[in-house]
Image (spheres, rainbow, N blue to C red):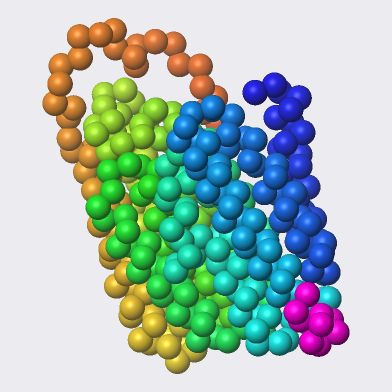
Amino acid sequence: MNPYVLTILLSSLGLGTVLTFASSHWLLAWMGLEINTLAIIPIMAQQHHPRAIEATTKYFLTQATAAAMILFASTTNTWLMGEWEIHQLSHPLATTTVMLALALKLGLAPVHFWLPEVLQGLELTTGLILSTWQKLAPFALMIQVAPTINSSLLVAIGLLSTLVGGWGGLNQTQLRKILAYSSIAHLGWMVLILQFAPSLTLLSLSLYIIMTSSAFLTLKTNNALTINTLATSWTKSPTLAALAALVLLSLGGLPPLSGFMPKWLILQELTKQGLPLSATLAAMTALLSLYFYLRLCYALTLTIYPNTLTAAAPWRLNFTMITLPLSIITILALGLLPLTPAVTAMLAL
C-alpha cells in the first residue's frame, strides 16, 4: 500500500477513536465509530486475497449493523426521554439495545461469531490492530453507559463470553482463531467487573492489549500461522520461542506473570460484591483457556518438527525486522505482577 494512503488511513483510525473518547453526544460518538470502521476496511482488504476480502465484508456488515443499532437506540432514547447525552441514557429499551450493539462491536458472546472468522482472514499486523485498537472506542462507550445497564445482563454476558472464549479455542489449530477466542474470553472478564469496578476493567484492558500485542508480534516474527509451524520456532530462535511460551502462559493468567494480576483482582472484587458463584464460574472457565495456551506452549517448546528440511535454512538469512517494540512489550507482558500493591493503592484512590 502507498505510504501516504496508509498514513491517512491510520490517522483516520486514530481520529475516529479519539472522537468517540471525547464525545458526550451520541451522534458524535456514532460518527467516531463510523470513521474508525471506514478507515480500517482498506487496511484489511489490502492483500487482495479472497479470504481477506471475505473477512473485510463480514467485518463491514457486522460493524454497520452495530452502528445502526446504536443510532436507533440513541434516537429512541431522545424521542422518549428528550436526551442526547451519553450519560443520560435511561430508557430500558435504549440501554439494552446499546449494550447488545456494543457487544456486537467488540465480539462478545452471544454475538461473537464474526470475530474468529474475520481474524482468520487477515494478516497478523491487521489482526493485531483489530484485536487491540479497535476495542478502545466501543469500550469507552460501554464504560460510560454501564451504570444504567442491568447488572445481571452484564454478568451474564461476561460469564458467557469467558465460557465461549475458553470452549471455542479448544479444538482450533489456526493461531489467529485461537487468539480470537482468547480475545472473547478476556473481554468477558472485563465486562464481568465493569459495573462494580470500572478502574479494574481499564487495568484488564491495558494488560490485555500489552499481552495480545506481544503474542501477535511474536507470531509475526516467527512467521507462524498454525500450531504445526510453531514447532519450527525453537530451531529458528530458541530465546524468542521460550519468551513466547511465557507470554502465552501470561495470557492464561498464571502467576508470577503479569496476566495473573487482573484475574486475581477481579475474582477478589466479585467476592467482595457478594458474587462468589460468578467468581467460581469465571475461575473455572479460565481453566479452559489455560488448556489451549498450554497446547501452544507444548508445540513451541517440547516438539521438534518431524520433517528434515532439504531447502536452505530460513533462519540463517539476515534478520531485518525491528524487534525493539517486541522486546519492550514482552517485558511488560511478563513482569508487571510485582507492581500489584502499587496498582491496588492507585485504584483505591
Vertically, is 332 above or below 284?
above
Residue 26 seen in the figure: yes
Q: Quadrant of the N terminus?
A: top right
Predominant SS of the magenta segment:
helix
Where does residue 331 sit, x and y in percent of width and height? 48, 43
29 over 18 or under it: above or below: below
Seen from the viewer's position, the closer of residues 134 and 73 is: 73
Q: Which quadrant is home to the C terminus?
A: bottom right
- Tally the marks: 0
Q: Quadrant of residue 43?
A: top right
Q: Magenta stretch: residue 180 in it? A: no
Q: Position of residue 204 (x, y in %)?
A: 53, 63
Q: Which residues are magenta?
A: 75-83
Q: Is residue 300 visible?
A: no
**Residue closer to the observer: 170 or 72:** 72
**Outermost residue toward the bottom in this view:** 274
Tell me where residue 319 appears, x and y as whole percent.
Answer: 45, 16
Q: Residue at x 39, y 82 (%)?
A: 278
- Residue 82 covered by magenta stretch: yes
Residue drawn 41% across the image and 35% down it = 219
Task: Look at the picture and state if 278 lies above or below 128.
Answer: below
Q: Please report the residue visible at 46 percent of the width from the left and 61 percent of the height from the top.
A: 112
| Left or right: 246 as drawn, with respect to 216 | left
In the image, residue 52 above or below residue 13: above
Q: Residue at x 15, y 21 (%)?
A: 307
State left or right for residue 110 relative to residue 281.
Answer: right
Residue 50, x across and y down, in percent: 47, 32
